[in-house]
Image (cartoon, rainbow, N blue to C red):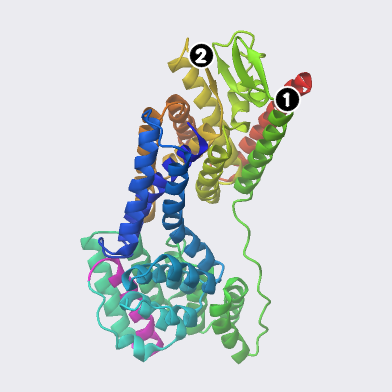
Amino acid sequence: MTQDVFLLLAVALLGAYGVAWSRRLADPWSELPLKTLASAVLAGTVAVIEVSGTPVGAPVRSLALLLTTPFVAAPLLVMAAARARRYGMADGLIAVLYWSEPGRDALRRVVVQAALQQGDADAALTRMPRRDDVAMRAQALAAKGEWQALLALPGAGEGEPSYLADGARVQALLALGRVDEADALAGVMRARFERGPQGPVGYRSTVLAEARVDAERGNLRKVRQTLQQPPVGVPPDELYALVARAAEVAGDRPVASRVYQEAARVAPEGRRRRYAERLEAWGETVPPPVRPRRSGRATTSLVGVLALAYLGQTALDLNLGAFVVGAIRIQASSIAAAFGMGLPGFPFADAWWRYLSYAFVHGGIVHIGFNLWVLFDLGRVYEARRGWGDLLAAFVAGTAMGAYLTSVAQAGDTLLLIGASGGVLGVAGALLADVLRSRTPHDRALTRSLVQWMLLITLISVWIPNVSLWGHVGGVVGGALWGFARQGLPVGRRVGEVAGVVSIALLLVVVTQILTVVWALL
């Protein structure tokens, strides 16, 4: 399979997910979902024709990539630009690629959401979709403190947007001193949530509304109790602000001051001003902002190591090329690190370290790019939940089990196994084990997404030649085994750190063995 065919398959896969995502932003038959669907179908069709043995030619493949990639990647690029506060760049992408108001409105919602996360109410209000979104406008007006305008908005209808709008109305009523009305509205939100459906947005909005009412009544104990397990997705400064407000109303000025200072430290600039004004009114010092703590360092480091290994692999293959092993031409990097079966003369074919070393070599830039992207995406989630050591242990377990299951299921076959897919799916399997029993709406949604993604990877592994089904299945199994075992071990970072140290030691030994083979080839 050529690189551009693999890339077309990746575009088709991303496009399929993008269609479901875009339909939540826009009407099903509007420009954004239709362009995403057309791009996924075109990319998938060209790739299927090519894989089925009917070459379409390099010009056709290149044209298909040129036509489809922008419309699959655009929403991701718009989101990234908006989160970096590059609003002009996001506006430009929307204007160039989408030509109807419904299409542009759909991606404007992405920009508005990012601006609200940054506390930038002005940016959110100036980019509000032309077809007004009541829930978004309510959140933007709440961020700006325009309470009367917020309460004058019409209802947001049904579904999760109604929770966002009602949560903003609770803020407005409390700011205007109408505590009993806010309490009643929070009660309505809770009753509606209990009736279902119970989504993560409804859960978060309802819990926050109830906590805000308790804070306004000075019930510090209840606010702290509610926020012991805060809803996923609530910024830290808003949690601090709730505790501070409860302490302030309860008359505990010293506690309120300290917690407002913590809120000011971690808040984005748009919300930081609000806390600074409160502290200055009390004659308190406003602390300097702190940079957000970098999360996912182990994930980023692992991604970097694999990327460096690919650069080394490329340099080695350019300098040494291929060798003949058992009448088969094999690249030098594969001789050094791949997991081989049924290859007479393959050096160290039965060595234990080859069950891990194959993760350090890949079949091309698309192969490693896809693996690194998924690892970066899922790895940070699992690392945030468990820690750096657990992440590395899941990667190692998935890699080893991917090779082992391949050796059992394909005993007697001649093959070379390369790529970090087993380790990446090990992380996915460990994450699935971690969320599988959870009852929170966020984790239930994450469970569904992981299962759907794994089923899709399985279908691709069965359908596409030279993609290792058992390497992928083994990766999930190995990671899940670690994830379930981890739940039975003592809670705390120490166990994970020990597992991480052991994993690093194993990987260092493996790298040493790879370098030994490379030295012999040189």
In the displayed structure, would residue 446 be above or below residue 430?
A: below
Q: Where is residue 203 in the image (x, y as percent from the top left)?
A: 34, 63
Dot 1: within a 10 Å radius of its alpha carbon, few (fewer than 14), some, or many (20 or more) residues? few
Q: Where is residue 437 in the image (x, y as percent from the top left)?
A: 37, 43
Q: Which of marks 1 and 2 is in front?
A: 1
Q: Nearer the viewer, residue 408 or 68?
A: 68
Q: Position of residue 140 (x, y in %)?
A: 42, 80
Residue drawn at (29%, 88%) of the image: 152
Residue drawn at (44%, 25%) of the image: 470
Give the amino acid type for the residue marked by disc 2 in the picture: Thr
Give the amino acid type for the residue marked by disc 1 in the picture: Leu
The tag on residue 277 is none
* Observer able to see residue 130: yes
Q: Is residue 163 inside the magenta stretch?
A: yes
* 345 horizontally vs 63: left or right: right
Q: Main secondary structure of the magenta part?
A: helix
Q: In which quarter of the image is the C terminus?
A: top right
Residue drawn at (59%, 91%) of the image: 281
Return the residue at label 2. 414
Q: What stretch is highlighted in magenta?
A: 158-178
* 57 horizontally vs 302: left or right: left
Return the residue at label 1. 320
Residue 351 quadrant = top right
Spatial CA span between label 1 and label 2: 23 Å
SS of the residue under disc 1: helix
SS of the residue under disc 2: loop
Residue drawn at (67%, 31%) of the image: 507
Q: Is residue 321 inside the magenta stretch?
A: no
Dot 2: within a 10 Å radius of its alpha carbon, few (fewer than 14), some, or many (20 or more) residues? few
- Count the numbered circles shown: 2
Q: Nearer the viewer, residue 305 or 257?
A: 305
For marks 1 and 2, the one nearer the N-term is: 1
